[in-house]
Image (tube, grey):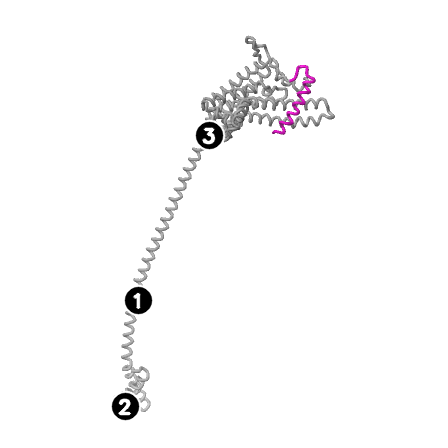
Amino acid sequence: MAANPMYQFNVYRIGPEIKIGDVDLSFTNASLFMVVSSILIFVIFKIGSKKNSLVPNKIQLLAELSYTFVSKMISDTAGIKAKPYFSFIFSLFMFVLFCNMLGMIPYSFTVTSHIIVTFVLAAFIFIGVTIIGFIKHGFGYLKLFVPSGVPMVLLPLIVIIEIISYLSRPISLSVRLFANMMAGHTMMKVFGGFVVSLGVVGGWLPLSFSVALTGLEILVAFLQAYVFAILTCIYLNDALNLHH
Amino acid sequence: MRIDLFFKSILFLFAASACAYGAESGGMPQLDPEFWISQIFWLTISFGFLFVFLSKFVLPRISENLENRKSQILENIEMAENHREESEAKIKEYEKIIEDSRLKAKGIINDAKIKIKSEINLKKDALENEINSEIVLAEKEIEDLKKRSPDKIQKIAIDTSKDLLKQLIGADINQSSISAIVEDLSKKGRDKYYGV
């Protein structure tokens, strides 16, 4: 075990090397945790939706509460028109949440602490939302960049700012999640390293910090998944109900 | 949240610089593109399958369960409402029956009262008539007695005075003279007592 706090983010190959042409598609520890998260979500919700009892048991209650939670989140932010995208946002929220939470288990790997993963998700959302916007409103979707009630003099500047802010959406969305996860895990590793280096005498203070940080990180893991999902809803709202 | 992020970024910078100093592997593994394609590939596969399975097999079921529960609850509420209405109707019916019977009882009592009253009146009248006729008879008798008594008294007075005189003086006195005296006296007395 290296003392380097960044060691935990290393990606390494598990099993054989898979190469298609020049492209390396090997199964790594990151892949393992993605697959485990997906399977875990599927199994939990499959069990939770299996029985149709009037008074739900615990796992059914969990599934139904998650369902209503995400459903309410979508209808609050994006309205009734966003109903067809419910499955996607639900899957996204659950996937990010489970990747974050599985990352909280010691010696596990946090999928969302890699910028490439969060960026691919954010880019997919960005492109998808942009396509939906153009399909729903045609070129009228460009009105998103022209806010109403702005003086003509300022308009070119505002439009440029709006376009930049729109284009930076996938970056801010992905970096927010990635940076939060990486910073939290690095900090915990640093404090863990302090515990080891200070030993039995002085290690208690960083240990208590580590304990507190674990609680905080679990909160952050949930919160960042929520923020990721709700920002997706807000972007979707912009594309569906054009009233900037 | 902002403060938290601020502290984290400071610590992150600290940690990043610390590992940049001591790292033989070279900084952040996130920026090493060796496994980027692999991560994108596996992300697409796992998330894609998750999305498809959830939207095909799981979410419709959960939605259906929720709908079923909702409709079941609504149904139950409706049924309870129906029962309540029914019971309320029953209560009204019951109250109506009670009210009806009360009215009936009142009518019966009133009828009985009227009947009794009329009967009493009839009997009273009959009794009064009887009493009146009795009174009339009695008055007549009294009147008769009144009429007849002076003569009788006169006769008795004559007889007694005759007997008294016979005893006192031992001689028969003429009946007619005694009666004249008695009549004279009784006339005075009658005036005095009877006011005739």
Residue underneath mark 2: B173
- Left or right of residue A24, residue B76 in this image: left
Q: Amino acid at mark 2?
A: Ile
**Residue at point 33%, 60% (across, down):** B117
Numbered circles on residues, count: 3
Q: Residues within 10 Å of mark 1 (few under 14, many from 20)?
A: few
Q: Which residues are magenta?
A: B1-27
User: Can marks 1 and 2 be said to lie on one chain?
Assistant: yes
Q: Report the residue that reaches farthest toward the right.
A: A201
Q: In this picture, is B195 found above or below A77?
A: below
Viewer-proximal residue among B90 and A14: A14
Q: Nearer the viewer, mark 3 or mark 2?
A: 3
Q: Nearer the viewer, mark 1 or mark 3?
A: 3
Q: Nearer the viewer, mark 1 or mark 2?
A: 1
Is residue A68 something one can see in this rendering? no
Q: Which mark is residue B128?
A: 1
Dominant SS in magenta: helix
Query: If you read the primary sequence from the N terminus, does the residue marked by circle 1 or circle 3 appear first?
Result: 3
Q: CA distance from mark 3 to mark 2?
A: 140 Å
Q: In this picture, is B105 found above or below A211?
A: below
Viewer-proximal residue among A214 and A137: A137
**Residue at point 46%, 31% (across, down):** B70
Q: Quadrant of the N terminus of chain A?
A: top right
Residue underneath mark 3: B69
Q: CA distance from mark 1 to mark 3?
A: 87 Å
Q: Secondary structure at mark 1?
A: helix
Q: Secondary structure at mark 2?
A: loop
